[in-house]
Image (spheres, rainbow, N blue to C red):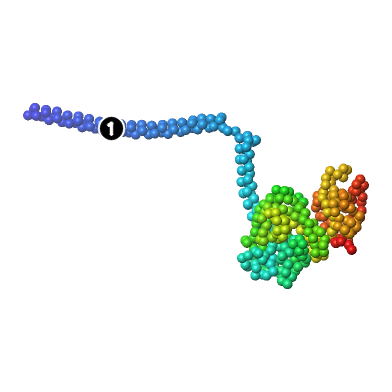
């Protein structure tokens, strides 16, 4: 009996010891598991730190190597020039396109549609329409001659103003030779554009040709180009057999029926010329022709004053020459119209005009531009050189040859 009790005690002790071992093993397992988790997290963090450190060191090393071995672009290298030109062209093109829209929006208020029938403004074709340019606040508008060619029909003007009515215009003067006319609409209330001195225009200068034949800026015409030739003189014959020079600008900006009679403007939004499809077709060079802004102003003044074409008239033909001893620059007279202003004043071929009313002759346009500011009958003082003699003479301006 006693032996059985001892045996039971021993088994109970063994069982308790086994339970204790199991419990101890569980605790150790949990501790080991926690330890493994902490170890894994520590390894992960260490790995991240190592990766970041290695990346930083690698980037620093590579950057230094690149800087040490970088290809240096010399300002004089072909690659540098090509790259710079490409960037300049991109910047210029982006600027030009933005600027063109701004200039057109501003100038379209000074351009009107012109037609011989009001219904043409609501059609689809611009072939029967023209653009007119407001020349002053009195309502004078310069238009292509075709707009007034048929004297049996009226002349109508439509402006760019919203819901604006159509106006009937009065014809002030017309010149089939040059291909322009002046009309007027009283109380039209439009402002003229800003005109630039066309003698300041340079070759290769950027210009924009604009037109508004429908009297609606959303249906206008805009082309972009550069100046090819400045102040080119065209000689034409008037109805009374006078030879007249017209100064114009050649440009590769396309001129068409849509911008015929419209403006040629610089990148400052200033008018440097009036587009002439007629002169463009006469030249047949593939370039567009615009009457210079100075010429357009003279034509307008002549029409307002007399209703006739380009007066007064000097009657001399030639070219500017430079490096004249003790004189500098002057106008070399090659030919003189018989019985004209210069002929009556005593000038002869081979004379060199030095000045007119003390205004020195610097370009081909100087003499004509000054004369156009005067009236027929005005007296001007011409200073010229004949061989080695300097002569001054008072000359009365005539508008045509004298019988």
Is residue 143 shown to the viewer in this render?
Answer: no
Which of 53 and 385 lies nearest the eye of the viewer? 385
- Up-down relation of residue 91 to residue 189 (above or below): above
- Up-down relation of residue 179 to residue 353 (above or below): below
Which x, y percent locates residue 388?
91, 45
Which of 33 and 328 lies nearest the eye of the viewer? 328
Does 383 sit left or right of 281 as displayed? right
| Residue 51: quarter of image | top left
Is residue 14 shown to the viewer in this render?
Answer: yes
Q: Quadrant of the N terminus?
A: top left
Q: Quadrant of the C terminus?
A: bottom right
Residue drawn 61% across the image and 43% down it: 86
Which of 214 and 50 lies nearest the eye of the viewer? 214
Residue drawn 61% across the image and 40% down it: 83
Residue drawn 43% across the image and 31% down it: 50
Which x, y percent locates residue 16?
19, 31
Dot 1: within a 10 Å radius of its alpha carbon, few (fewer than 14), some, or many (20 or more) residues?
few
**Secondary structure state at the residue bearing disc 1:** helix
Which x, y percent locates residue 64?
54, 30
Which x, y percent locates residue 208?
68, 54
| Residue 256: quarter of image | bottom right
Residue picked out by circle 1: 29
- Residue farthest to the bottom? 152
- Up-down relation of residue 39 to residue 342 (above or below): above
């Amino acid at each position: 009996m006693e032996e059985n009790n001892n045996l039971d005690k021993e088994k109970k002790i063994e069982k308790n010891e086994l339970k204790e071992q199991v419990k101890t093993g569980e605790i150790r397992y949990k501790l080991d598991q926690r330890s493994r988790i902490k170890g894994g997290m520590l390894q992960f963090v260490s790995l991240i730190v190592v990766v970041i450190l290695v990346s930083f060191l690698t980037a620093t090393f590579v950057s230094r190597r690149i800087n040490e071995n970088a290809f240096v672009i010399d300002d004089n290298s072909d690659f540098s020039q090509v790259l710079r030109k490409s960037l300049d062209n991109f910047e210029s093109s982006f600027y030009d396109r933005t600027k063109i829209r701004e200039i057109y929006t501003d100038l379209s208020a000074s351009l009107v549609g012109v037609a011989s029938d009001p219904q043409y403004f609501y059609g689809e074709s611009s072939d029967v329409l023209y653009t007119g340019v407001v020349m002053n606040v009195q309502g004078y508008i310069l238009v292509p001659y075709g707009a007034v060619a048929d004297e049996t029909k009226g002349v109508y003007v439509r402006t760019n103003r919203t819901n604006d009515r159509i106006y009937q215009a009065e014809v002030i003067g017309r010149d089939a030779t040059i291909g322009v006319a002046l009309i007027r609409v009283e109380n039209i209330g439009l402002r003229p554009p800003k005109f630039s001195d066309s003698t300041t225009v340079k070759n290769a200068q950027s210009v924009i040709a604009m037109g508004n034949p429908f009297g609606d800026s959303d249906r206008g015409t805009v082309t972009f180009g550069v100046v090819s030739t400045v102040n080119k003189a065209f000689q034409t014959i008037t109805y009374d057999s006078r030879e007249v020079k017209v100064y114009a600008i050649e440009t590769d900006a396309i001129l068409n029926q849509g911008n015929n009679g419209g403006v040629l403007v610089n990148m400052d939004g200033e008018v440097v010329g009036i587009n002439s499809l007629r002169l463009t077709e006469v030249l047949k060079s593939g370039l567009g022709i615009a009457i210079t802004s100075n010429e357009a102003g003279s034509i307008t003044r002549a029409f307002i004053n007399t209703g006739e074409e380009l007066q007064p008239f000097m009657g001399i033909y030639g070219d500017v020459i430079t490096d004249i001893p003790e004189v500098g620059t002057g106008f070399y007279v090659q030919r003189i119209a018989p019985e004209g202003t210069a002929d009556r004043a005593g000038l002869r071929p081979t004379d060199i005009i030095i000045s007119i009313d003390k205004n020195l002759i610097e370009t081909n346009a100087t003499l004509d531009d000054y004369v156009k500011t005067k009236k027929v009958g005005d007296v001007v003082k011409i200073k010229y050189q004949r061989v080695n003699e300097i002569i001054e003479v008072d000359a009365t301006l005539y508008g045509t040859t004298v019988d």
